[in-house]
Image: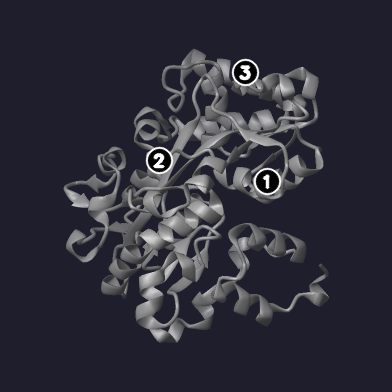
Amino acid sequence: MKMDDFDIERFKQKLFSGEISRRQLGKIMAAAGIVASTVPLASKLRAEEGHPIVYTWAGYDIPEFYPTYVEKYGEPPQFSIWNDEEEAITKIRGGFQPDTVFPCSYKVQRWYDAGILGPMDLSKIEHVDDIFPALRSMDVIEIDGQTVWLPVDWGQTSVLYRTDLAPEYVGNETWEILWDPKYEGRLSTMNSLIDGVAVASIALGLEDPFTIEGEDMERVKAKLVEQKPLLRFYTDDPTTIEQALASGEVVAAVAWNQSYAALLREGLPVKFMNPKEGAMTWVCGMSIVAGGANPDRSHEVISAILDPRARAFEMTEYGYGSATQEPYKIVDPAILEELGMPSDPTELLDSGIFQAPMSPEPELQQMYEEVKAGV
């Protein structure tokens, strides 16, 4: 698609009507040469109408995620999109004022310490009691005696691989495929601490894969240095991963459930590993921003995204798990089976390697940058 052919008004209409899926959105934006954080979306279109601003990830900005809000007000809330959470925190501290944000559990404390998160009134939010106990008990939900975050969805970081191109790993699932010299130049990992560096520490069998100090840091660095010449690329972009796996350019990649669901629908022979060392489980959710102009509607937004219809939609379309229990009764069992998702994920959630803050983060970030730069 050339920029001259890109009809922005038609794009907006399709986006707000829900005709464009999360995966399609990424492909359209990449084809048009648009960076996600520069897309104005609804925040500039309807700022005068009093809808709260939801500052979030791309793909969480469609009407299907907020059914009760749309039913009440005739349209979804406003949206602004970030590329990553550090970018979002910096923008808010610089003066941007959204009403709700969508942090992941391992970053909630960081958001709170930055003075961004305000308290929630749970009496104004529906479906809270339907959240799985394993998630409802997470220690970042309450900080300093007040509720500042609620889990909405969860998924896993694992290896997505082509079973036809790496058949020896079928039934022998391990993170070590990402260090297999046989596939030099046909592997990929994430350009992030939590989904890149932590993978190496899990592969090494470290007791705490998220706290890496002293000799352990040297071991992890050596593991990452060993991996670097085997990689086709580092990326945080699911679309890039999906396209590379679909073409066979890449045999195995660190990925999320979303990419597995997307490639299954294309009929490709792929599998999302359950590595013997353990997959990582991430949990993301909603918070209210302190000092927001629309606190009542912000609570309505959170109720809307926790609605069973919204959670079932995300499970079906993106392949992610719901933090609430009711959607598992709504989604077709055949779809759950296809996505490799249990009808009751309690055991999976109880046994998951839940992502935690990386520590010491500055030192680990510097180390990872040195590895990627070949220093």
Q: Quadrant of the N terminus?
A: bottom right
**Which residue is drawn at the image coordinates 31% and 52% (left, top)?**
150
**Which residue is drawn at the image coordinates 79% and 25% (left, top)?**
184
Badge number at residue 75: none
Q: Residue 302 or 147: which is nearer the viewer?
A: 302
Q: Does 315 sit above or below residue 344?
A: below
Quickly name the residue at label 2. 106
Query: What colour scheme does the image use?
Result: one colour
The amino acid sitting under disc 1 is Leu
Quickly name the residue at label 1. 263
Badge number at residue 172: 3
Mark nearer the viewer, 3 or 2: 3
Q: Position of residue 248 (x, y in %)?
A: 80, 38
Q: Are marks 2 and 1 in contact (CB under 8 Å)?
A: no
Q: Residue 326 or 364: which is nearer the viewer?
A: 326
Instruction: State the SS at label 1.
Output: helix
**Which residue is drawn at the image coordinates 31% and 75% (left, top)?**
293
Mark nearer the viewer, 2 or 1: 1
The amino acid sitting under disc 3 is Asn
Instruction: State the SS at label 3.
Output: loop
Tell me which label, 3 or 2, sits earlier in the chain.
2
As measured in the structure, the alpha-carbon distance from the residue carrying label 3 to the one carrying label 2 is 30 Å
Q: Residue 360 or 246: which is nearer the viewer?
A: 246
Q: Label 1: few (<14), some or many (≥20) within 10 Å?
A: some
Q: Position of residue 155 (x, y in %)?
A: 48, 42
